[in-house]
Image (cartoon, coloured by chain):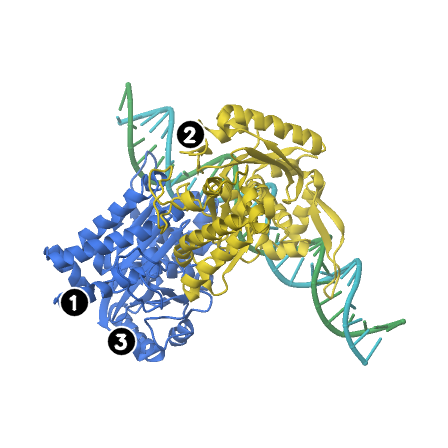
Chain colours: A yellow, B blue, C green, D cyan
Amino acid sequence: MSGKGELLRLVALGHAESRAELARHSGLAPSSVSLRVEELIEAGLLQEEGSGLSTGGRRPRRLKLAPNAGLLAVADLGSHHARLGLVDLAGTPLAVVEHPCDIGAGAAATLDWLAGRLTELVAAGGAGLPVRGVGVGVPGPVDPAGGTVISPSRMPGWNEYPVAAHMARRFDVPVLVENDANLMAAGEHLAWPGCDNLMVLKVGTGIGCGIIAGGRLHRGRGAAGDISHVRVRADRSVMCSCGHSDCLEAYASGAALMAALAGQGIEIGHPADIAALAADGVPQATNLVRGAGRLIGDVLTALVNFFNPDAVVIGGSLSAAEQLIAAVRGAVYERCLPLATRDLKIDVTRAGPNAAILGAGSLLRDIVLSGDWIEEAAARP
Amino acid sequence: MSGKGELLRLVALGHAESRAELARHSGLAPSSVSLRVEELIEAGLLQEEGSGLSTGGRRPRRLKLAPNAGLLAVADLGSHHARLGLVDLAGTPLAVVEHPCDIGAGAAATLDWLAGRLTELVAAGGAGLPVRGVGVGVPGPVDPAGGTVISPSRMPGWNEYPVAAHMARRFDVPVLVENDANLMAAGEHLAWPGCDNLMVLKVGTGIGCGIIAGGRLHRGRGAAGDISHVRVRADRSVMCSCGHSDCLEAYASGAALMAALAGQGIEIGHPADIAALAADGVPQATNLVRGAGRLIGDVLTALVNFFNPDAVVIGGSLSAAEQLIAAVRGAVYERCLPLATRDLKIDVTRAGPNAAILGAGSLLRDIVLSGDWIEEAAARP
DNA sequence: CGGACAAAGTTCGATTCCGAATGAAGTCGG
DNA sequence: CCGACTTCATTCGGAATCGAACTTTGTCCG
């Protein structure tokens, strides 16, 4: 009856590779596992692949997800770029492409465009496999219940737009809509085994933060992880677009650093260039980057004491600047409680630029594999 | 076979009062529920109590936990007081007493003393019922795995002491050891239905914070919720016992306010007296309390943006000072993002002084009702 | 090389669990 | 006051699940 999705999930997550492991991790009897695995193989969702290594007895017959079980189509929308990916149910990216994309064109237009690109991608790299789910990351707060964007400062014309419903109309599969930093956090979570409490910072044009608490994404009321409008100690006073003064974002975001560099006669086109300049040892850049790291670190001290994570992970285009990481480390280690920094890891992204794609795949898989199409598929010949 | 604990839990939590409701909430078939409820009644753990109100059909036969199912003995240790409670498996406190208690006497001596008082309490108010679990709250960080206290600044001689093991030796039942603010958070969580993301502040001699994230207690690596050593913006510089300057605790804790009052010639014995003075309109007290609230609120702004809770709950002896609550509200509502403060509640404790007792009962119940003594008890005549 | 041992997977009888049908108890409207 | 309708709880046959014993396939060691 039920429970087949759970077995698929265990295999997909890499938690089990044999019937015996499935039995151990799922709590089901070995006999039941055998039966259900048989059905899943019949249905073409699982597949046997040789045998594993013996641990003193008979070798396990390794199981893996059948490649034709289906795919997930996911996208990470940025302010000016969109990164699209095709992911299999195991979470492995099959194809990733990047397009320029103007999110300011409005929700409906952008989503229609996105649906078109995703369809192309599936046609090109999907090998005719069925799409089981669609995921969209957006650079703004998301109402987790309705799949709508709420009060997005970077996304004019998107407020309250039913993103999930729009995409569901185009694809007729489960749709995940999530904040981009949250997707990134979910992606990093995969890369930090054993770390079930994470803070994942995205330092690019803006500053975002995704939170993993107790192994699960923490959404709060939908806006959790906003650290860009925390007040910082500054010697001068700068207004932020949010209406308050001295927000972190106004000093330490890529946008702020670009403006500061421009004030010193250095014009660049993208926040990533700042990291490049800093790597080249351009004094103005290293100085700014170090200052930004210091400010971010100061803000983090309070949050680290409060949240007590296993690791603080820093991604986004500015994470390539070593001086920034070093400055964050310095501030946190100096000012936090020893109990909070003991064993605390502060490091740059492990999942890399695909973090959000991987995270979307991971979250979407949990949705898709708990759906009831599995039972139906297993019932058919 | 299994699942009886789950049924008991649903009844104990008040989520189900009839067999039909149990079936709905547990996902089991009505027939299975009937059988198992029968066994639980046989075993004396459940009990029928008249019938409930009809909703258009046959009246449900109301179920409740049998009074003789057992009790939980819990204690909340403070620096100078210990509050002990007897709680039934439904979470209702049957008896609460307070003793003076010097935690500085050392772990073993204090715990032996505590075990004695708990035994007395059970003998006096326990009606001969079996104790199913013991819970202890301590004013310091707790390693959730081992049930040991770690690096407790207020508890000399307790470092690494195996509190859980000590109490288990005395009572031979499951033992819960937890930080006092965490217990308080668990207690408040019961009083804030629908709020699964809570920050619960305890403002007394010190400042602590318990966190409910996604409906569960967030422990982090064991030290989560420490907000007392966040740096605040101050016009002067004060050293804190932690070795840094300008910690929140050094300005806004009951201890700091008492010291400040003493400096103005007002000697009091307990932080609760500050709230009393403030209620009386003593200018020095109201001024200090308002300043403390402002500082706490400033610290909270960052945390509220980050964590995005449903509610911020303020307890502890200083929560009786209305000026403090008002100042916290003012700071948070003024400086936080609208998205974070929209629908955010900032209020004083609903669970009152027994919050920690109730919380300990709640957490302990989950442990006790997942134990296997239930199956054994149901197997016996 | 052969036998003791270990682990993976399967078979099969016994048990548990589900679910539709049934009975029980009660509300509502005419 | 009676019949249609709701909801709660139980009965009972059939299906799913378990678990112990067993087979298969391997390692390890004398």
Residue D17, how many percent across, how many down?
59, 50
Relative horizontal placement of residue B281, taking residue A88 as reference (left or right): left
Q: Confirm whether residue B380 shows in the render.
A: no
Query: Looking at the image, which is closer to me, A86 or B145?
Result: A86
Q: Both on one chain, marks 2 and 3?
A: no
Q: Both on one chain, marks 2 and 1?
A: no
Q: Secondary structure at mark 1?
A: helix
Residue on which the image places disc 2 = A159
Query: Disc 1 marks which amino acid?
Result: Gly
Q: Residues within 10 Å of mark 1 (few under 14, many from 20)?
A: few
Residue B230, how many percent across, how many down?
35, 58
- Label 2 close to label 1 by CB (< 8 Å): no
Residue B380, how many percent across, how many down?
44, 64
Q: Which mark is residue B285?
A: none
Residue on which the image places disc 3 = B102
Residue drawn at (50%, 40%), measured in percent from left and top? A265
Tell us which disc is closer to us: 2 or 1.
1
What is the spatial separation of the Cα atoms under label 2 and label 3, in whole angstroms?
Answer: 57 Å
Query: Disc 3 marks which amino acid?
Result: Asp
Relative horizontal placement of residue A126, taking residue B353 as reference (left or right): right
| Chain of the residue that carries numbered disc 3 in the rendered image | B
Quadrant (top left, top right, bottom left, bottom right) of the C terminus of chain A: top right
Residue extending furthest toward the front: A265
Residue C30, how many percent across, how many down?
28, 18
Q: Secondary structure at mark 2?
A: loop
Query: Disc 2 marks which amino acid?
Result: Asn
Q: Secondary structure at mark 3?
A: loop
Query: Looking at the image, which is closer to me, A216 or B335?
Result: B335
What is the spatial separation of the Cα atoms under label 3 and label 1, in whole angstroms?
Answer: 27 Å
Relative horizontal placement of residue B326, taking residue B108 as reference (left or right): left
Tell us which disc is closer to us: 3 or 1.
1
